[in-house]
Image (tube, coloured by chain):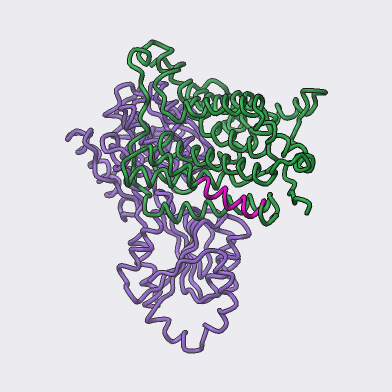
Amino acid sequence: MTLKTTRRTLLAGAAATGALALPGSRLLATEQVKAGWVYVGPIGDHGWTYTHDQGRLDVEKALGDKVVTTYVENVAEGPDAERVIRQLAASGNDIIFATSFGFMNPVIRVAKQFPKVKFEHATGYKTAPNVAVYNARFHEGRTVIGTIAGRLSKSGIVGYIASFPIPEVVMGINAFTLAMRKRRPDAQIKVVWVNSWYDPGKEADAAKALIDQGADIITQHTDSPAPLQVAEERGVSGFGQASDMRKFAPNAQLTAIVDHWGPYYVERVKAVLEGTWKSHIIWHGLKEGMVQIAPYGPRVPEEVRAEADAVKQGIIDGTLHPFAGPIRDQAGELRVPEGQSLSDEELLKMDWYVEGVQA
Amino acid sequence: MDPIVATTVSVISAATPLLLAANGELVAEKAGVLNLGVEGMMLVGAVSGFAVTLITGSATLGILAAASAGALLALLFGLLTLGLMANQVATGLALTIFGVGVSSLVGAGFVGTPVERLPRLDIPGLSDLPVLGPLLFGHDALVYLSVAMVALTAWFLGRTRAGMILRACGENDEAAHALGYPVIAVRFAAVLFGGVMSGLAGAFLSLSYTPMWVEAMTAGRGWIALALVVFAAWRPWRLLIGAYLFGGVTILQLHAQGLGLFAVPSQVLSMLPYLATILVLTLIAAGSGRRRLDAPACLGRPFRPPA
């Protein structure tokens, strides 16, 4: 059961909230949970927000009539977000998922006013007794696709379409570069910033520019399938982002890094149902299945598949660390000596590029 | 393909949607109507063009659907602002918000489906010429149309009697009315033309530039088109220069980043097209006499025929 809400109807419904909160509704809370999602973009972006909404649908599928879900899309990060989150809390939701970094402070403020409501914030770092934080190790996926690129690139030049220079994106560029240069030490990663998470036209233009400059593999940290579509047309290869984008590039997509939020959402809503919910801060990756690798495309030969699978298994087993030393930065200075690796804290603050990145 | 030629081809496709939408808006503004709903009309055009092309398999029908959808939204705008005298700025903004919403609703079922790119009109022999072939020949129909429409608009506004009447409605509506010209009807026609052109710009985005439908895929291009009209000082040929300049700077900054040419932050490079707009506006505004900014005198002003 879904209640689709826009900001406007949510406000209109606020007046009725008092009437709805009948004394009996508290008693039912353990038999039926109301869960709300706050999205930063449209669910039709085929990227970030789309994958979170798939997770919401998984919750509905798994828990059936034990759950009522609501979502509000296109919520701007800022004062608007606080109002939307407060409304969701006031209208009887038991658990609220806020799925963008910029919702962090609004969530913390609203959580103080609604101590009985559970809050879950994606990609942040502030917690409270009723606020949990969850994030995914997207860079682990980039280690796997970097491995594939290192084996399949002929020119040794990869075009990387990037959004904003924040640690998460820098971490991804570095993980990809390290994995690729392990197979192909002379590889060059050309980074082009489009300064947007989502502008299909500009992403496509960036892909064209990079291909014109000799890149024969394109990868991206932006949300639309446009770069892959260009790759397909120009006869080069690429990787899907956030969701499997095979339909846009049946030949060109080598694989895709897929965000898979469903199991986590099901687990957390279930915990509310059973009364076992606790605040935590988690950063899940390939091991927990929050980050997945899509099926390989037709251009990936058997031995490369095996190698990529081995890298993936290594990360899952903990025998392979994406940021294991020795790691040199762009200036050639040794940042991480052999035998050591970067800690999670260091990764979350990453503001330097490894050797081989051209940005 | 030679990298310089390839870059120029990218510039042409980046400039085309801006040129189409801005050309339509220019005509509407020349008649005295400020329609801020370009972004909304483009989105509705993009989703209609995509949906019809996907369902019928005919790109021609898709383009016609896009033009009609843009016109339909423009019709709504015309009824509100010209018929009911609603405020043009507020109505235009509402039209954009409406367009974003309705295109997402209609397009919800089409997300994640690719469509065949608009066919290139190859001319045997000419398209295979070394440099000139890919530059001048072998684009799709909408690219040629965008340039042809500039020529047509320039001719219409500057050389024909009907064009002069349209300009008169924008410069002095009361005088035009006193002379017996149907001001409201002329403005309605200009607004509809604007809708058709915005719809076509949307179709170019979803059928040629990036042949797919994703929500809000215009990413602000409607607003850039509005700025271009001012940038061009309401002159069609300057619009052509403006659109290609804008497209050119956008593409070149991406190339410069890939080549690692400048040691400037990428954010500065992303600002370049907008800086260029501000610079030209300042230069135009600072000039004297004929070079000054000459907006149509009745732009944005509602007209009620005296009883």
At 66% from the left and 52% from the top, the residue drawn is B81
At 36% from the left and 34% from the top, the residue drawn is B117
Question: Which residue range is magenta in the image?
Answer: B70-82
Chain A pictured colour:
purple
In this rendered view, identify the residue nearer to me: A257 or B251. Answer: B251
At 40% from the left and 15% from the top, the residue drawn is B133
> Residue A214's spot in the image, x, y percent?
38, 21
Q: How many marks?
A: 0
Question: Which of the 4 image quarters holds residue B231?
Answer: top right
Q: Is residue A11 above or below residue A309?
A: below
Please tell me whether residue A267 belongs to the stretch shown in magenta: no
Q: Of all residues shown, which one is farthest toward the front?
A: B180
Residue B88 in sight here: yes
> Residue A111's spot in the image, x, y percent?
56, 69
At 29% from the left and 40% from the top, the residue drawn is A255
Assign the C terminus of chain B to one quadrant of the image: bottom right
Chain B pictured colour:
green
